[in-house]
Amino acid sequence: MANKDIAKRNTARLFIWLGIALLLLLIANLLLYRHWKPIITLPAPPTVAGPKLAIVIDDLGYNSKQAQTLYKIDPHITLSILPHQRYSSQIAQAAVEQGQELLLHLPMEPKRYENYGKMAHMLLVNMKPAELKRQLKYNLDNLPVAVGVNNHMGSYFTENEGQMRIVLAELKRRGLFFIDSYTTPNTVGYSLAKKLGLSTGKRDIFLDNIDRIDAITSQLQKLAGRAKQKGKAIGIGHPRSNTFSALRHFLQSEAMQGVQLVPVSELLD
């Protein structure tokens, strides 16, 4: 009987101590809450992407120093290299080592040979499908490190949907994108690429049709304005001393404030 009384008393004491511990814990929490406020994590505000522009410099492959100059001006300039030229492979390898983006500048038939001349390894409208595919493969295989393609000339070829369909299907198979240089208002390149599910873009402004620094600077200002208006813009220029001078100064000017120069692959549709 005495043992039962002792057990009851011990149990009662245990409950009393537990009650006191809970009360002390509650008091401590109340005192601490006066000096502590819960941290509320709010979702981050949405990132607002600023305007971006890309500059593609065509016709590289004849002079190895031109690509080096472009890298020094800005490594985000995209290089577009003609296939099978003396320095094509050398420029491509250097670009890869430096982390520059490069395209294959694919020769396509223009409307007037008398003005432009027929270039070796050019894709022609009258080529049979098998011949076209062989020539295309020969050009693409010359620069296997290229991540995309834009057309060299091609005012006649890019208007031909049948021939362009063959070209774009091969680019898609290889995982390459297509930038339509827009050498004719009747090109089907950009619209057909989108229809085929190929990553694509199109030239907004040619930078140096007039080979003067002031004229090129004016075109660059238009390009930046287009980027600010539409969010993105693509300009195409050529490896000329006046183009290099205009780029060197313009990319550091106030006109570029708020505008980001990016590789052209970042502006694809």
Image (spheres, rainbow, N blue to C red):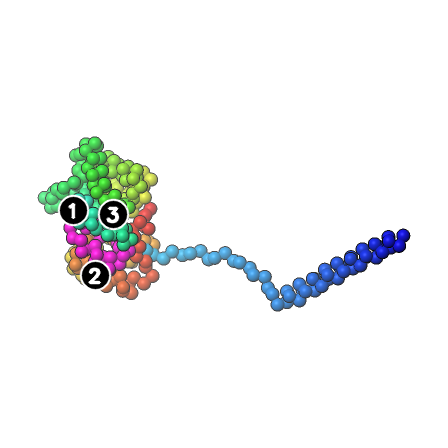
Q: Secondary structure at mark 2?
A: helix
Q: Residue at x 17, y 49 (%)?
A: 87
- Does residue 46 sit above or below 162 in this rendering? below
Single out the mark in the foreground, 2 or 1: 1
Type of residue at label 1? Gln
Q: Name the residue tied to disc 3.
A: 103
Q: Name the residue tied to disc 1.
A: 85
Q: Are marks 1 and 3 in contact (CB under 8 Å)?
A: no
Measuring from the top left, give residue 2's x and y in whole percent.
89, 54
Looking at this view, is 57 or 45 the one in front?
Answer: 57
Say if the magenta span includes residue 64: yes
Single out the mark in the foreground, 3 or 2: 3
For the record, the magenta segment spans 55-81
Q: Classify mark 1: residues with Cα within 10 Å, few (<14), some (14-19) or many (20+).
A: some
Q: Classify mark 2: residues with Cα within 10 Å, few (<14), some (14-19) or many (20+).
A: many
Measuring from the top left, give residue 171's x and y in whole percent.
28, 40
